[in-house]
Image (cartoon, grey):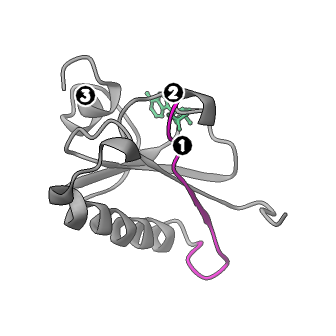
Amino acid sequence: MKDCLFCKIANKEQDADIVAEGDDFIAFEDINPKAPVHVLIVPKKHVSSVNDVKEEDKELMGNLFLAAQKVAEKKGVKEQGYRLIVNTGKKAGQEVEHLHLHLISGKNLGF
Ligand code: AMP
C-alpha cells in the first residue's frame, strides 16, 4: 500500500535491518528497541490491523507464528523465552497501521 512504512520495507524501498524473510513475511530489527531483542514480524500483504484480518488471511496469520519461531531461533532466545505483542488500535499503542508482531526478549519479562 502506498505511503505505508512497512509496505515500503517489505518492498525494499526503505532500509531496515532484516533478520529473516520468507515468501509472505519480513522480519526486521525495531528501530527503537524496548529490550535487547526486539524484532518486528510483518506480513508482506498489507493488513492494517487484527481488526482487518479476513478469512482468506488465516494461513498468512499462522505463517507469522512460524516466522516468529524462526526469528526466536535465529536470535538465540527460543529456549529462554520471548513475548509476542500485537498492538491493535491507537489506544493500544499501534503507531504503524500495518499488522505486525513484536518479538521481545532478553530482559526479565515476568509480571
Ligand atoms: P506499534 O506501536 O505497535 O505500531 O509498533 C511500531 C513499531 O515500529 C515501534 O516499535 C517503532 O519503534 C517501530 N518502527 C517505526 N519505524 C521503524 C523503522 N523505520 N524501522 C524499524 N522499526 C520501526
Callout 1: helix, strand or loop? loop
Q: Earlier in the sequence, mark 3 or mark 1?
A: 3
Label 2 and label 1: CA atoms lie apart by 9 Å
Quarter of the image for residue 55 reads bottom left
Query: As rendered, which of 53 and 84 lies closer to the eye?
Result: 53
Q: Specify whether tag 1 is near ligand 1 (CB below 8 Å).
A: yes
Q: Is residue 18 visible?
A: no
Please name the amino acid that badge 3 sits on.
Lys
Task: Report the magenta residues as a range.
Answer: 77-89
Please name the amino acid that badge 1 sits on.
Asn
Residue where numbered disc 1 is placed: 87
User: Dot 2, crowdedness within 10 Å: few (<14), some or many (≥20)?
Assistant: few
Q: Specify whether tag 2 is near ligand 1 (CB below 8 Å).
A: yes
Image position of 37 (left or right of 20): right
Q: Earlier in the sequence, mark 3 or mark 2?
A: 3
Which residue is at 21% across, 67% downward?
A: 59
In the rendered view, tell whether residue 52 sits above or below residue 74.
above
Label 3 and label 1: CA atoms lie apart by 20 Å
Q: Quadrant of the N terminus?
A: top left
Please name the amino acid that badge 2 sits on.
Glu
Residue where numbered disc 2 is placed: 95
Residue where numbered disc 3 is placed: 8
Between disc 3 and disc 1, the foreground one is 1
Which residue is at 28% across, 67% downward?
A: 63
Q: Specify whether tag 3 is near ligand 1 (CB below 8 Å).
A: no
Most distant residue in the bottom direction: 79
Q: Is residue 103 magenta?
A: no
In the rendered view, tell whether residue 93 sits above or below residue 25.
above
